[in-house]
Amino acid sequence: MHNNLYPELHPYHQQFLQVDETHRLYVEESGNPDGIPVVFLHGGPGANTEPMHRRFFDPKVYRIILFDQRGSGQSLPHASLQDNTSADLIQDMERIRAALAIKQWVVFGGSWGSTLALIYAQAHPANVLALVVRGIFLCRDEDVKWFYQQGTSALFPEYWQDFVAPVPESERGDMIQAYYKLLTGDDEVAKMRAAEAWSVWEGRTACLQTNDTVLDYFSDPHVALSVARIEAHYFANGSFLKPNQILNDAHKLKDIPGYIVHGRYDVICPAQQAWALHQAWPESQLNMIEDAGHAVSEPSITQRLVEIMDELAKKLS
């Protein structure tokens, strides 16, 4: 499945970076310490980085930085919602950049990672060498409702049944708020049941064809809890963004080399979001992948991302 990726590699440096009184972030570096810095932004919010994520980048050319966002993966405290907003995550990236003494870096992110990449680049355009974004998620109300209220539900009616099951029928008119209540409540059993149902819904719909590896990842209780809690927290709060912020601020990206990669049959973040971004940011290169859904592990998406990073390496070195 991943024959296009670079071989497995191990970090040469790992640390926990204290970013405020509450949060310590897991940060790792691999590849070439003197190479072109690239930072990988994972999805969710609330998912995490994985060893496979190092492998999109030529380790001879790139200094590869992976980190787990607040409350995610190995970062502590796990699944914490305290001081966990989009602005905090942007600030964390600046803290990491400063801690690693990096002037500019390539920013690479998919799904929620594309959201964070775009709002970071709009806030700090001078610090971004290039932007590679996949599975575009603009985080507008309609984008969130498509997946969690009405849209994807029409394509996966039997999986949707399982998603709505933890929520009382009278509360299904606002699935985000209903889940947010369950995921922040005191009933631990209800919380874990809700977390699993929320996360499995994402795992089942992420690929063009059901992928057991992806489903196993989202079914893991540790992952499910942070993904469900942090996503519900963000989406219940408008993702801590102004309405239509990403498209309205797209002009701030015009001087940044940009690559958009999106699966034609992405049912989590429909292709219209990638198209809208490309219209607002015409300098970007749009790559619509014809035989893929949402996940970064979709073979044609993986392949195109590796090709882009190889092309960029030549341009930047």
Image (spheres, rainbow, N blue to C red):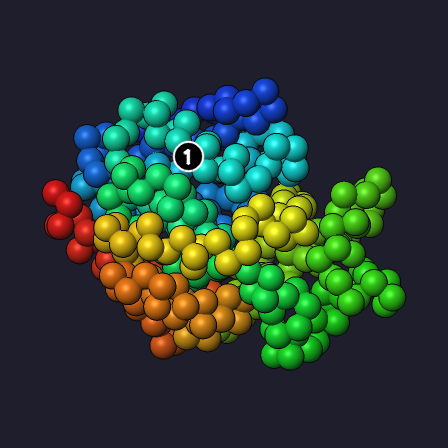
Which residue is denoted by mark 1 in the rendering? 93
The answer to whether residue 160 is left or right of residue 99 is right
Residue 226 image position (x, y, % from top left): 63, 43
Which of the pair 32/283 is nearer the observer?
283
Residue at 27 percent of width and 54 percent of height: 254
Is label 1 in a helix, a strand or a loop? helix
Residue at 31 percent of width and 52 percent of height: 253
Please determine whether, in this image, residue 101 is positioned above or below residue 199.
Answer: above
Residue 259 appears in the rendering: yes
Res. 140 image quadrant: bottom right
Which of the pair 65/6 is nearer the observer?
65
Which of the pair 233/44 is nearer the observer?
233
Work out which quarter of the rendered image holds the C terminus and state it.
top left
How would you rate the neighbour count of disc 1 (Cα within 10 Å): few for under 14, some for 14-19, many for 20 or more? some
Work out which quarter of the rendered image holds the N terminus and state it.
bottom left
The answer to whether residue 7 is left or right of residue 219 is left
The answer to whether residue 76 is left or right of residue 18 is right
Residue 64 image position (x, y, % from top left): 30, 38
Given the image, on which type of amino acid does mark 1 rest? Met
Residue 262 appears in the rendering: no
Give the total number of marks visible in the rendering: 1
Residue at 61 percent of width and 79 percent of height: 155
Residue at 56 percent of width and 65 percent of height: 143
Residue 67 image position (x, y, % from top left): 44, 36
Please determine whether, in this image, residue 237 is positioned above or below residue 210.
Answer: above
Residue 316 image position (x, y, % from top left): 15, 45
